[in-house]
Amino acid sequence: MMDRQRRNDRLWAREPEAEAVLAAFLDDALAGNAPAAAFAGRLLEDTAIRLRDILDHITLAEAAAAAGFERAGWSPAEAGVWRNAAGLFPPLVLGDRTTVWLRVEDVATFLEANRITAPIEGVPGNPLRRAIAFRGGSTDVGVVERSGHAGFDVPEVPQDLLRLARIHFNALRVRRREFDTVEAGLAHTEALVDAAIADLGPHWACDLWLKAEREFWMKRCASGRFQKQRQDAAGVGWCNIDHHTYDSSRRHFRHTIRILEKLGYELREMLYAGELAGWGSQVLEQPVIGSTIFADVDLAPEELTIDFAHEVLPDLPRHRRAGLLSELLGESILEAGLNHVAGLYDNVALRGQLTAAGIAFMTPFSDFAHLYQELTCGDMAPVDPRRVDALEAAGHIGAEEAEKLRLEGSIVTHLENIERNDGFKGFNREGIDSVLRKLDPRAYHGEGITEAVAGAIS
C-alpha cells in the first residue's frame, strides 16, 4: 500500500526557465501576427482568459527550432513530438509550417464568433477538427477541437461511429441521477460508461462524460453559466478547464474511483493536510485528454498511509465535510453533480469582471506568484428535510445546524478562478484545507460567505 502511495505523492515544482522560453516564443509569434495579437487582447478583456492557458500544441517548421525548448526541458517523446512533462506545457510537433494551435470547444463556433472564413478539417463530431484562424508572416495561429483524440492529425472516422458518439453523449447528458439506493445509481452510471467505452474507447467516452457533467453543473451554478456565455461569445467555450471536483461518501468512494479509472483516469498525487484535517483528496489525471479530477472524501487519522482510493472505508462515527454533503445533497457523481469546475484565468481580470457583474468571491485560498485559487461564494439549493432529520438523529449535526439547513439550504456549486504560472501543475494543500473547513455546511452558515449572485445573471 505504501509503495503505491509514494509513487502517487508527486511534488510538482515551478519551471520558470521553460515558461520563459515558451513566453518568448509566443510573444514573437504574436508580434508577427497582428490578427492573432488582437484576438489575444479581446479574449483577455472579454473573458479574462490568457492565450497561454489555451495552448494545445505548437507545430515547428524544422527540428532546429526546438533547440531552445530542449534546453528548457522539452525532449523527444514519440516520432516527431517533443514534450515537457515537468509541468503544464504544450507539446511540440515537427511539421511544414510553424503554427500555434489553440484549444477551443468547437471550431465552427469559433470561426463564426470571430467572423473568420476558413476551411475546417474534419466533419462535425470528429474526434479532432482544426482550422487556421489567423495567418501571419512566419507563424500562423490555428484552433483545434478535440474529443479524446491524442494525435495531431485529423483522423478519418466512419459515420456510424460518429452516430454512436452522438447517441452516447445524449445518454450521458440525460442520465438518471436519483435512485432509491446509491448502489443502484452507481451501477446504472457504470453501465452507461461501459457502453460508451465499448463503442468509442475510454478517451472519447471521457470527453463526452465531462461535457455532460459540466452541463449538469451549470444548471445550478449561476457564475458558471454567466462565464460560459462570455466564453461562448468569444468562440472558445470551455477551453480552459484546469480541473473538476467531486465529493463522495466513504462508502461509495471506491466505486466512484472505479468509474473514473474506466474512463482513463490514473492516480496522481494524494493530498491531505495532516491527521486532524479529516479529509483526503485523490488527484486523478486523464493523460490523453489532459483532464484532472479532484476526488474528495472524509478520512480518519490512521488512513493517511493507505491507498484510500481503493481500500474499503468503513463509516465514521461523525461525517466530515464530504460525507455530510453526500448525505445532504447526494453523491457528486449522481444527483449532487460536480462541486466546482476550475478554469484557468488571469485572476485579477476575472475577479474584476465578475465582481462588476455582481458575482462575489470568497477569500482566496492560494495566493502565490505561481498559483492563485479562489471560489465564487457559491449557489444555494434547498435540502430535503428528511435528509436533515436523519443526520440530526444520528448525531452528525446539531439542532441549530439542522434548522438552518432546513430553512436556508446548502451550497451546491462554485466556479473556481485559478491562475497558474511557471508551468506549475500542483496544488496548495494547506490552502485547500482552509477552504474546505469553510465549506463544511456546519461552518459556512455562521461565516457569512454565501453572498447572493446577482439575480440579473441567474
Image: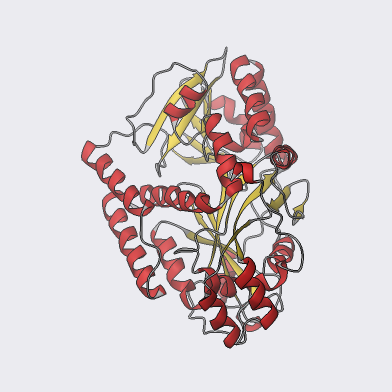
- Does residue 33 appear anywhere in the picture? no
**Residue nearest the viewer, comparing 453 with 177:** 453
**Residue nearest the viewer, comparing 389 with 3:** 389
Q: Is residue 354 shown left or right of residue 303?
A: right
Residue 449 picture quarter: bottom right
Q: Position of residue 35 (x, y in %)?
A: 59, 16
Q: Position of residue 96 (x, y in %)?
A: 46, 20
Q: Is residue 417 shown left or right of residue 245?
A: right
Compared to 168, does 335 lie above or below? below
Q: Position of residue 118 (x, y in %)?
A: 43, 17
Residue at the image position 45 percent from the left and 28 percent from the top: 109
Q: Is residue 175 shown left or right of residue 7?
A: left
In the displayed orientation, state which residue is furthest to the top: 137
- Does residue 311 appear anywhere in the picture? yes
Residue at the image position 40 percent from the left and 57 percent from the top: 263
Compared to 452, does 324 lie above or below? below
Residue 189 picture quarter: bottom left
Compared to 438, does 109 lie above or below? above
**Residue nearest the viewer, comparing 96 with 257:** 257
In the displayed orientation, state which residue is furthest to the front: 407
In this figure, what is the number of numbered marks? Answer: 0
Compared to 13, does 7 lie above or below? below
Q: Position of residue 339 (x, y in %)?
A: 57, 59
In the displayed orientation, state which residue is furthest to the left: 160
Q: State how the image is colored.
A: secondary structure
Residue at the image position 63 percent from the left and 34 percent from the top: 47
